[in-house]
Amino acid sequence: MKYEKAKSSWIIQKSIEEDVGIGDLTSNLTVPEAYMVKADIIAKQDGVICGIPVMKQVFDFLGGNVVIETYYHEGDRVKANYKIARISGPARIILKGERVVLNFLTHLSGIATVTSKFVASLRGTSCILLDTRKTIPGMRYLEKYAVAVGGGKNHRMGLFDMILVKENHIVAAGGLKNALNMIYSDPKPEVPVEIEVTNLDELKTVMEYPIDRIMLDNFSIQDIKKAIALRIAADKNIPFEVSGGINLENCRIYAETGIEYISSGSLTHSFDALDLTMLISEAR
């Protein structure tokens, strides 16, 4: 996923408004307006850096001719105590943007870091790691961007770019066959169609339709192997996605069954932020 300023500008603006409000009262009282500083952003632990374009966009929004020198590219690995960037400019502007910048950098770098660990665990298999829609409201674009920076792939962005029939849709539609028949009552939809199944009987039913992908929800390793055997016996090449209970400890085991995709909500809802700090090194 390529970073697009237009898609993140509103959340950046809202984040600044949330933090700054009527103004930075502390800096305005303690720091002369003419003071210029240099500040370093430093990693306090190893990880994958993500959010450099966001940092630049925050300071662009705040103005004040801030100059940013970066020592790493987006997606690079950094070690603890290494400097990531140097920010030079008006002290008040840099202090005003400090927390907003760090909030974005630590959050997005945390996602990119855990994603990179999943990707490393899957290396050597043909399985692709996907994210989910389990994101913080308003942060989906940036969080999915961070997954891509970490080496993962994006599932659908929202309800609008893919048909994904899940358990509640099936119940609301009056059954699996009803839902499928309604989807395929006219020519095949123009967007991809994925169906979630919770057991092997549902899988047999779904494979009778021209599905683009099938999600095996909370399947055991044994049942995944049975599902693959059923697919082979039916002479189908529909890709399987496994979801539910996937974590760093078990993702490799699932991938080695031969499934094509693994999706994990933990990439965006159960990660540790990367510990970063900003320290002023020069002031005049």
Image (tube, rainbow, N blue to C red):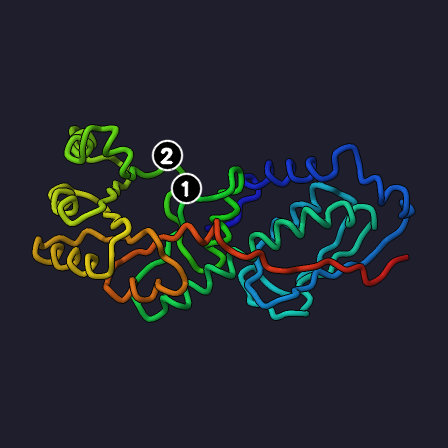
Between 34 and 20, the one lying in front of the other is 20
Callout 1 secondary element: loop
Q: Residue at x 47, y 54 (%)?
A: 147
User: In which quadrant of the rendered view does residue 224 lie?
Assistant: bottom left
Q: Which mark is residue 157?
A: 1
7 relative position to 97: left or right: left
208 relative position to 34: left or right: left
Q: CA distance from mark 2 to mark 1?
A: 8 Å
Give the x, y percent position of residue 111.
51, 55
Amino acid type at circle 1 is Met
Q: Residue at x 63, y 60 (%)?
A: 275
268 relative position to 207: left or right: right
User: In which quadrant of the rendered view does residue 170 lie?
Assistant: top left
Q: Residue at x 49, y 50 (%)?
A: 145
Give the x, y percent position of residue 240.
24, 53
Amino acid type at circle 2 is Phe
Q: Are marks 2 and 1 in contact (CB under 8 Å)?
A: yes
- The quarter in which the C terminus is drawn is bottom right
Name the residue that disc number 2 marks. 160
Q: Residue at x 92, y 47 (%)?
A: 32
Callout 2 secondary element: loop
